[in-house]
């Protein structure tokens, strides 16, 4: 074929080849912007980042998962965002009873800084973009910002009842958990200006985690024994309570919430039941229970996504729960007892750091053996300590939940 007709056919054939090969495509609208924390980490061993089929249903603007089978695939040792790569390895401990923060050097186990906050600091939370830490001064109705490059605090920001703090997976909203006001406040993630408040039908709203696609969250309500399903997608109209479910048992007291690596199950710690409930988030129903120990409270995934560390505050122990079998495979008891509460895993995955809520101390625990490496005296009522920096492209909040 020659002439105009031949050129047209050739162009069509070229377009077909490009479509099949995947060449010539522009950036996807869900891709993180170049230079953002979400774009600064590559897959392990230089492997290509695959896009799961369900990526079409992701919360718009949310970075694509590195692995459709593991929501924690970006949290491997060494996979530090370039934003945090040069930040000092510190542990930030909010002392709720003494209105202070103690800062511990992870290498020496020594306190290197101490400063005052607003009244009743509860948790220290990394911002979505990893550039700032926030201390939630619950009774002080304020947030204290910390520069993680220096470990020094800044001027407080007025925020009502910040018991806990999360960020939507697209980074568009900070989610202040206003426990005593029974609200979830959607705020600007940088200025903390209120966008809108969402009243919740429960008492003691505390902790949450987000679905793998980012479109909803499972939220715990400590004092009424409930969990909520809260919509995240669809703007203000979609950000609403989708359902409420009371956990089994006489007086459940749900605490921390953590998603399984495959995104199929939410684990909900229950202090009264002494273990964790397994919740199918999509169907919004309880599908099982795993006993761990008295006062089951905080939960943290290991760097290889194989196990979940569960702190049993009243038992003075840590349970190691297998994600594959959904069974406890080990239990570590603190020598001489203790009250392990909230914390996080070190960047290399070798140390689990937990606050000792009722003992005015912090524990550093070897994740290979369960051996207690250090018991560090701190202020009164240490609560949601933050281990920083950690691997991950962005933070979902609390004391550091990364994806």
Image (tube, rainbow, N blue to C red):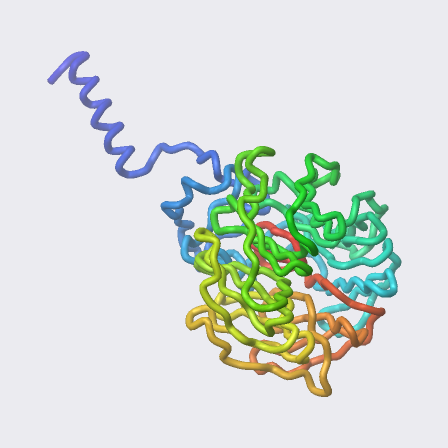
Q: Is residue 70 left or right of residue 318?
A: left
Q: Is residue 366 left or right of residue 17?
A: right
Nearest the viewer among 349 and 353 is 353
Nearest the viewer among 177 and 253 is 253
- Residue that protrudes farthest toward the bottom in the picture: 336
Nearest the viewer among 310 and 395 is 310
Nearest the viewer among 151 and 29 is 29
Where, by quadrant of the figure, is residue 191 drawn?
A: top right
**Percent position of residue 219, x then y:** 60, 53
Quarter of the picture holding the N terminus: top left
Note whether residue 70 is visible: no
**Percent position of residue 113, x then y:** 84, 64
Query: How many marks do you count on the picture?
Result: 0
Q: Residue at x 69, y 81 (%)?
A: 373
**Percent position of residue 353, x then y:** 68, 70
Where, by quadrant of the figure, is residue 36 drawn?
A: top right
Q: Residue at x 64, y 40 (%)?
A: 173
């Amino acid at each position: 074929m020659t002439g105009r007709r031949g050129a047209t056919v050739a162009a069509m054939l070229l377009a077909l080849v490009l479509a099949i090969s995947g060449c010539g495509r522009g950036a996807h609208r869900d891709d993180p912007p170049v230079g953002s924390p979400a774009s600064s980490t590559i897959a392990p061993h230089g492997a290509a980042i695959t896009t799961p089929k369900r990526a079409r249903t992701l919360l718009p603007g949310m970075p694509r998962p590195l692995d459709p089978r593991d929501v924690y695939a970006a949290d491997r040792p060494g996979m530090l965002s370039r934003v945090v790569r040069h930040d000092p390895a510190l542990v930030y401990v909010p002392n709720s009873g003494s209105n202070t923060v103690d800062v511990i050097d992870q290498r020496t186990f020594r306190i290197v800084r101490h400063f005052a906050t607003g009244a009743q600091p509860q948790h220290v939370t990394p911002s979505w973009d990893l550039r700032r830490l926030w201390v939630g001064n619950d009774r002080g109705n304020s947030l204290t910002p910390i520069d993680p490059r220096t470990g020094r605090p800044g001027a407080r920001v007025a925020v009502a009842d910040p018991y806990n703090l999360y960020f939507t997976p697209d980074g568009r909203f900070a989610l202040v958990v206003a426990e005593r006001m029974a609200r979830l406040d959607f705020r600007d993630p940088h200025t903390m200006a209120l966008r809108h408040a969402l009243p919740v039908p429960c008492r003691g709203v505390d902790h949450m985690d987000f679905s793998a696609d980012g479109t909803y969250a499972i939220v715990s309500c400590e004092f009424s024994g409930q969990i909520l399903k809260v919509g995240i997608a669809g703007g203000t109209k979609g950000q609403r309570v989708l359902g409420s479910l009371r956990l089994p048992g006489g007086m459940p007291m749900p605490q921390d919430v953590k998603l399984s690596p495959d995104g199929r199950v939410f684990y909900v710690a229950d202090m009264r039941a002494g273990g964790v409930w397994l919740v199918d988030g999509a169907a919004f129903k309880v599908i099982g229970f795993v006993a761990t120990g008295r006062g089951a409270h905080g939960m943290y995934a290991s760097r290889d996504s194989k196990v979940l560390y569960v702190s049993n505050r009243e038992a003075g122990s840590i349970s190691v729960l297998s994600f594959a079998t959904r069974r406890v495979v080990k239990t570590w008891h603190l020598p001489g007892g203790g009250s392990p509460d909230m914390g996080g895993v070190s960047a290399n995955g070798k140390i689990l750091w937990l606050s000792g809520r009722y003992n005015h101390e912090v524990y550093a625990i070897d994740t290979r053996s369960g051996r207690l490496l250090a018991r560090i005296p701190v202020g009164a009522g240490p609560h949601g300590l933050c281990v920083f920096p950690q691997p991950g492209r962005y933070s979902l909040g609390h004391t550091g939940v990364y994806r």
